[in-house]
Image: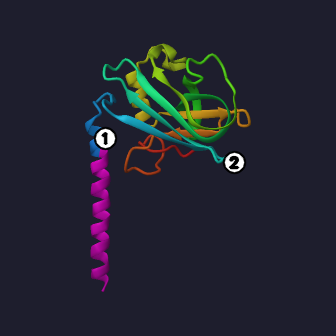
């Protein structure tokens, strides 16, 4: 009786391992040794940070230009209220947003811009170029940033009037990895 139960469980475990490995293999096929990623679109799901009560959710999509000169982004929101700004941040200690790398909303930066009331739809869309990088990221390339997003080293934060620190936050999750700690290719613990 035990053999009939154990064999299917072992087959299932091996199947999950193989499928997960194949998903990661496909992702890593497109990555070069120095973390460059070509022809890949990254989707970052955004949800409420701990202790923030909101029904808002979002998604940031990043696509590297074929010539590697820019990253096209689109920031879509669902039921967010009173947005003031959105950025790509370094993933800091404990998976929390660290220093700002570049602005997403308002595009071009320059300070907060209140989008008053409840909003669903495309909040911002544009191209990221190295001249928009701040802090320790000045002098780095968009390929560095794209790799940083893809490796869970940079995430997206959306700030609102009622939650100026951060309301929504997200870090890229590699397909097939589920919720893992930052630094292991998955979602941050934050």
Between 184 and 145, the residue placed more toward the observer is: 145
Q: Which residue is rendered at x = 49% and y = 20% of the image?
A: 137
For the record, the magenta segment spans 1-24
Q: What is the image's colouring?
A: rainbow
Residue 130 to residue 121: above or below: above
Is any atom of residue 166 visible in this view? yes
Q: How would you classify the magenta stretch by its main secondary structure?
A: helix
The answer to whether mark 2 and mark 1 are in CB contact below 8 A is: no
Residue 54 to residue 66: above or below: below
Residue 183, given in percent of the width and then of the height, sits at 44, 40
> Which quadrant is the C terminus positioned in?
top right
In the drawing, what numbered circle is on residue 53?
2
Q: Secondary structure at mark 2?
A: loop
Looking at the rendered image, the disc whose residue lies closer to the viewer, 2 or 1, is 2
Residue 113, given in percent of the width and then of the height, sits at 67, 23
Residue 85, given in percent of the width and then of the height, sits at 63, 27
Residue 142 placement: quadrant: top left
Q: Which residue is rendered at x = 28% and y = 30% of the image?
A: 33
Q: Secondary structure at mark 1?
A: helix
């Amino acid at each position: 009786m035990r053999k009939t139960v154990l064999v299917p469980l072992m087959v299932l475990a091996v199947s999950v391992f193989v499928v997960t490995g194949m998903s990661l293999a496909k992702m890593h096929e497109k990555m070069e040794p120095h973390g460059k990623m070509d022809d890949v679109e990254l989707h970052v799901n955004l949800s409420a940070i701990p202790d923030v009560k909101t029904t808002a959710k979002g998604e940031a999509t990043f696509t590297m230009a074929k010539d590697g000169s820019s990253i096209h982004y689109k920031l879509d929101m669902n039921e967010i209220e009173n947005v003031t700004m959105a950025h790509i941040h370094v993933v800091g200690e404990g998976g929390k947003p660290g220093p700002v790398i570049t602005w997403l909303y308002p595009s071009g930066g320059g300070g907060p811009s209140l989008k008053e009331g409840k909003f669903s739809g495309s909040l911002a869309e544009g191209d990221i170029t190295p001249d928009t990088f701040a802090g320790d990221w000045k002098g780095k390339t968009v390929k560095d940033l794209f790799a940083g997003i893809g490796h869970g080293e940079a995430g997206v934060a959306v700030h609102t009037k009622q939650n100026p620190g951060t309301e929504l936050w997200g870090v890229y999750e590699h397909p097939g990895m589920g919720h893992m700690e930052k630094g292991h290719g998955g979602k941050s613990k934050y």
